[in-house]
Amino acid sequence: MKPNKQLRIKYHTDYLDQSDFSSKARLLQSIWRTEKGYDFEKYGNFLKEDFAKQTGANYLTDSIFKIVKNEVENAKTKGKVISEPRIWNNLLSSQPLAFNLFGELKLNGLLATKVFQKLYPDLKIEKVTNIEFEYSPGRKDLKYTGDSSAFDVFIEYLTTSGQLSFLGIEVKYAEHLKDNPSSHKERYEKISKESGFFDLSQLEKLKEKPIQQIWRDHLLTLSLFISNKDYFRGDFIYLFPSENTECVNAIAKYERTFLPNKENYFKPLTIEKIVGLLKEKSTEKWITEFEDRYLNFNKTNASW
């Protein structure tokens, strides 16, 4: 259900959203901004651009802010796509969320290792060795998917037997998944066939919204260790908040394109679950601040 209209007016977020959850998430970000005492620009979920860029107010710690500044400064030379001013001033964007959730883990490999060991014991993770943001092995490289797909977060790890493997992560927050799909490439079908677990009679459905982007990012994962042997293994994590029913429904639709009883390397994961594990493994302040900012939807149920 969409939040109370008077509450949306109060926090300057009363305009058309594509889903009720988007409206709730937008309101929650504006409430967080107000609690912090930050001014807004036009809409409640946007910080003033200059202020945001100078102070890093969109980020939970100074360390995360430093990582983001470095990523922005080096984006072009590394072939990364990081949009300004969104990265600084858009509180609702899932790109800053990705940095806020994984930035400190990039600096704390031990904590990252503990969390992902607990999440995926079957992967036999010995040690998380690196975390990258907006990572692609080669945009438009036909060795991979031949398009501009990239992972929001890319985690490399060593298995207990010393094999280099990875987790490719797509991060969603308030996305409504109603955007039109990108142009189709024959490379997608080739990788799908090589993987051996797609029901090839479902190919036309895979080309449609809302699941085409999930498919493309999943194929990028598969291209790294099935089509090519860059890694021993890779898994694709689709990370989303549990209340985003657009994501929940898209995942269910996507999983219906798999053949039964086949390893598919697809791992949907809620933000709530990973935050719960972080709280279990650490008492660092940024974790509870992340939870309060992005997941405390009780605030959006308040009466006027």
Image (cartoon, rainbow, N blue to C red):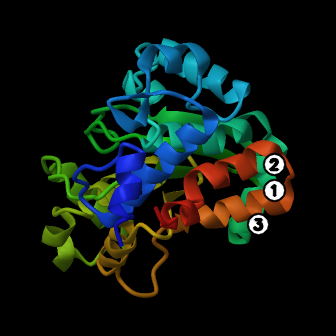
The residue carrying mark 3 is: 118
Q: Which of pointers 2 and 3 lies earlier in the amino acid sequence?
A: 2
x, y percent for residue 73? 50, 12
- Dot label at residue 111: 2
**Classed neighbour count for the residue bearing mark 3: other residues with Cα under 10 Å, few (<14), some (14–19), many (≥20):** some
x, y percent for residue 249? 33, 75
The residue located at (31%, 81%) in the rendering is 256
Task: Specify the amino acid type for callout 1.
Answer: Lys
Q: CA distance from mark 2 to mark 3?
A: 11 Å
Task: Specify the amino acid type for callout 3.
Answer: Lys
The residue located at (22%, 53%) in the rendering is 16
Q: Is residue 144 left or right of residue 304?
A: left
Q: CA distance from mark 1 to mark 2?
A: 5 Å
Q: Is residue 20 left or right of residue 200?
A: right
Label 1 secondary element: helix
Residue 136: quarter of image: top left
Callout 3–callout 1 Cβ contact below 8 Å? yes
- Dot label at residue 114: 1
Task: Specify the amino acid type for callout 2.
Answer: Leu
Of residues 286 and 156, which is closer to you in this image?
286
Label 3 secondary element: helix
Which image quarter holds the N terminus? bottom left
Q: CA distance from mark 3 to mark 1?
A: 6 Å
Of residues 95 and 153, which is closer to you in this image?
95
**Classed neighbour count for the residue bearing mark 1: other residues with Cα under 10 Å, few (<14), some (14–19), many (≥20):** some
x, y percent for residue 80? 41, 25
Callout 1–callout 2 Cβ contact below 8 Å? yes
Above or below: residue 3 compared with residue 167: below
The answer to whether residue 68 of the structure is visible from this angle is yes
Q: Is residue 156 left or right of residue 285?
A: left
